[in-house]
Image (tube, rainbow, N blue to C red):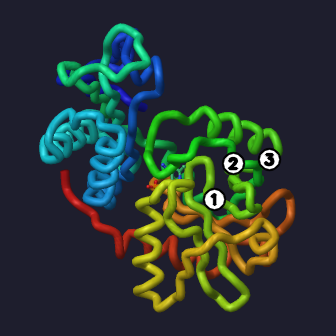
Amino acid sequence: MTRIVYVNGAYKRYAEAAIHAEDRGFQFADAVYEVIEVLGGRLVDATRHMARLDRSLRELKIAAPMSQQALLQVIGEAVRRNRVSDGIVYMQVTRGAGPRDFSLPGADILPTLVVLARAPRRGWADELAKTGIAVKTMPDNRWGRCDIKTVMLLPAVLAKDAARRDGAREVWFVDSQGAITEGASSNAWIVTAEGVLVTRKLDSNILPGITRAGVADVAASERLKVEERPFSVKEALQAREAFLTSATNTVMPVVAIDGQQIGEGRPGPIAQRLRSRFHQVAEISAV
Ligand code: PMP
């Protein structure tokens, strides 16, 4: 449970944490966010997450609310005040509040910053990873700049809901060429019959996942070959293994796509190995 939320300079009780009614994040989804895993009260891959936040802000010309060092202090406070040992920290930066106007405001508007930390039910992801999850493919109907981590998540929310109603925990979006782009909130991977890891190359259709980068590091340390290229739904259905990556799931085995079993229909050895090694290779830093 989140007890305390940082909002624009103050640590507020959860029920009282609020932003302005004309915040541009609320009006236009004119905002970006980050989610960092917290492990033993420390941050996983904070440097890469901070760099991605910085890039998202620059791409949209949203001012940074504070220095990275100051933001890391706020993150540390949010983790401590919510007594999170294992969980996540969520931060959102919006362009700020002002009378609703499609035109971008001038430089006098101050960005809004919200930071909160939360611990999910202990061990839920490990439990899920034991059996693996099902995913459902759906046409990718998101915008053309999915490389920016914006809060414009309605297509992902609706697609995930449709997947859930079909008994799948995640969506794998498919582009107009029939290639899988990524999940609604994760990156998509397969393992070929030859044991090669395949994930789409970075382009404007996918988020440059921090866990994706970390898994590439783990793969390199394990001398596993990684190919960054598009792969079709057909290729995924014939894969030896499939899995997804995200800060909240690390590596999650995918055992079914559109109701069809992948490989043996249980978590594969490569996905399990990458999952178990992930935190040994990732940057873990105190806050
Ligand atoms: N793609 C999308 C669309 C996402 O929302 C996420 C999670 N925020 C990811 C990929 C995975 O990124 P990360 O590994 O940085 O959590």
Q: Nearer the viewer, mark 3 or mark 1?
A: 1
Q: Residues within 10 Å of mark 2 (few under 14, many from 20)?
A: many
Q: Residues under labels 3 and 1: Cα distance?
A: 21 Å
Earlier-in-chain disc, 3 versus 1: 3
Q: Residues within 10 Å of mark 3 (few under 14, many from 20)?
A: some
Q: Residues under labels 1 and 2: Cα distance?
A: 8 Å
Task: Determine the image quadrant of residue 253.
Answer: bottom right
Task: Determine the image quadrant of residue 200.
Answer: bottom right
Q: Which residue is mark 3?
A: 167
Earlier-in-chain disc, 1 versus 2: 2
Q: Amino acid at mark 2?
A: Asp
Q: Residue at x 18, y 24 (%)?
A: 9
Q: Which residue is mark 1?
A: 181
Earlier-in-chain disc, 2 versus 3: 2
- Asked if disc 2 and disc 3 are in contact, CB closer than 8 Å, the reply is no
Residue 284 % position (x, y): 27, 63
Left/right placement of residue 207 relative to residue 82 reads right
Quarter in which the N terminus is drawn:
top left
Q: Is residue 241 above or below residue 133?
A: below
Q: Which mark is residue 140?
A: 2
Q: Nearer the viewer, residue 22 or 78?
A: 22
- SS for callout 2: loop
Q: Residue at x 25, y 59 (%)?
A: 47
Left/right placement of residue 124 relative to residue 216 reads right
- Asked if disc 1 and disc 2 are in contact, CB closer than 8 Å, the reply is yes
Q: Amino acid at mark 1?
A: Thr
Can I make out residue 163 in this image? yes
- SS for callout 1: strand
